[in-house]
Amino acid sequence: MAGVEILRKAVAQKISTLYGHQYNTTTEITITSGATEALMVSIQALIRAGDEAIVIEPMYDLYGPAIELAGGTPISVSMTVPATPDETYRIDWNKIESAITPKTRLLILNTPHNPTGMRLSEHDLDILEVLLDKHAFFVISDEVYEHIVFGSKPHLSLSSRERIAERTVVISSFGKTYHVTGWKIGYCAAPEYLMTEIRKIHQFTVFTVNTPIQIALAQFMADPATYTGLANFYEQKGTICQMG
């Protein structure tokens, strides 16, 4: 139900190698029917009637309806728009803290961000750590574009910070990484006490995911270049298009 063991182990190994966090493959990683299901079941597991969930605009269109379906209220906080071509969109953490109330149960982040390309910095994670120390909420980190990053600034997974990871569900997508969105295979990783609740929803939503494809993906992931080389793959295609 949680996914085949060899794929869960491959995911855990990737996260450990890239971000330095070790998830228990038996209790803390679940293979889902795409990142969409991972997001839905995580939101359903964490949000209760009357809760508030902070979402960052612009956002993936699933977040709001999923929160409302769980009986919660989405609270939108807009990103700061760049003032010059040299700047990028960024999260205004002061606005986020101002939006936190006693009803705040969840903060949903998307990094790397679609459609702006914003990536969280170490400073952003420092601020998030402080907010988590001050306030009692959970985080869902939608990291489906984790391997599609360009330039010298790397993707910083929320799993890379122990204090953040202990209150966070990290979600990613094989479809985005391996160009197979129609296969609907993704995963979520979270501490056991959160994953126990997520799996209850997953069990009665899809129960399990296409087993042969899981095994194939685990074998494909054995070569880390299949995901670490993704940005270079796109850059080469972009160069060819420009030349054409």
Image: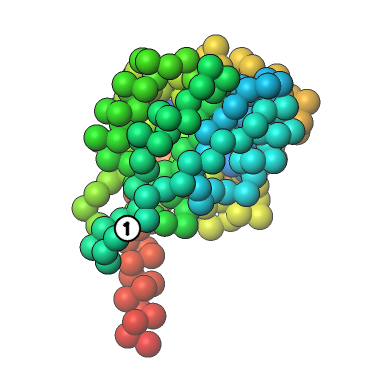
Helix or strand or loop: what does disc 1 sit on?
loop
Residue at 33 percent of width and 23 percent of height: 129
Is residue 44 toward the left or the right of residue 20 in the image? right
Instruction: Measuring from the top left, give residue 238's x and y in whole percent.
Output: 36, 73
Q: How many numbered circles does the render carry?
A: 1
- Which of these two is toward me, 52 or 5? 52
Give the residue furthest to the front.
98
Q: How is the image coloured?
A: rainbow
- Which of these two is toward me, 126 or 4? 126
Q: Quadrant of residue 96?
A: top left
Q: Quadrant of the N terminus?
A: top right
Give the residue furthest to the top.
193
- Which of these two is toward me, 237 or 76? 76
Residue at 61 percent of width and 54 percent of height: 181
Is residue 29 toward the left or the right of residue 230 in the image? right
Vertical comparison of 184 with 199: above or below: below
**Residue at mark 1:** 82
Is residue 240 toward the left or the right of residue 85 in the image? right
Instruction: Measuring from the top left, give residue 142's x and y in whole percent.
Output: 49, 39
Instruction: Measuring from the top left, give residue 236's x and y in whole percent.
Output: 33, 70
Q: In which quarter of the image is residue 214?
A: top right
Q: Can residue 123 be seen in this view?
A: yes
Q: Quadrant of the C terminus?
A: bottom left
Give the residue furthest to the right.
204
Badge 1: few (under 14), some or many (20 or more) residues near its Cα, within 10 Å? few
Residue at 53 percent of width and 44 percent of height: 173
Instruction: Measuring from the top left, give residue 110's x and y in whole percent.
Output: 46, 43
Vertical comparison of 232 with 167: above or below: below
Q: What residue type is labelled 1?
A: Pro
Residue at 48 percent of width and 25 percent of height: 100
